Amino acid sequence: MAQFDIHHYRRAGSRARFVVDLQSGLLEPMATRVVAPLYPLPLGQKLLKGLNPEIEVPGDNGVFYLSVPELAAVQRSVLGECVGNLEARRADIVAALDLLFTGI
């Protein structure tokens, strides 16, 4: 598993079909991973600029948003197949984390 990988999410009752692994690869041996959910972006919905980056999931129609305020630690076992990686969006994701934790 790598930082910024997009995974199918296999947790019953979750609204999220995908999550993004935000945890550093240096912590690979841990039993948990810190993730944030991806939700479909409803038409016309306004999101807090900078806090919820818009994301396209490879092989899936539509635009999603990364819900950074909902990040959580989950067991590795609930992470399904990796369907892509958002390393190219690293700056946007780290900026959203900075906004969440530092307000800037």
Image (spheres, rainbow, N blue to C red):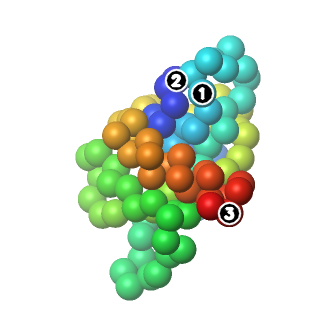
The residue shown at (42%, 76%) is 42
The quadrant the C terminus occupies is bottom right
Q: First in sequence, mark 2 or 1: give its number.
A: 2
**Alpha-carbon neighbours of circle 1 within 10 Å: few (<14), some, or many (≥20)?**
few
Label ID, residue 1: 2
Mark 2 or 3: the one toward you: 3
Vertical placement of 62 versus 46: above or below? above
Q: Residue flagged by tag 1: what amino acid is it?
A: Ser
x, y (%) of residue 101? 71, 55
x, y (%) of residue 98? 62, 52
Q: First in sequence, mark 2 or 3: give its number.
A: 2
Q: First in sequence, mark 3 or 1: give its number.
A: 1
x, y (%) of residue 96? 55, 56
Q: Residue flagged by tag 2: what amino acid is it?
A: Met
Mark 1: which secondary structure? loop
Q: Report which residue position mark 3 lands on.
A: 103
The residue shown at (36%, 81%) is 43
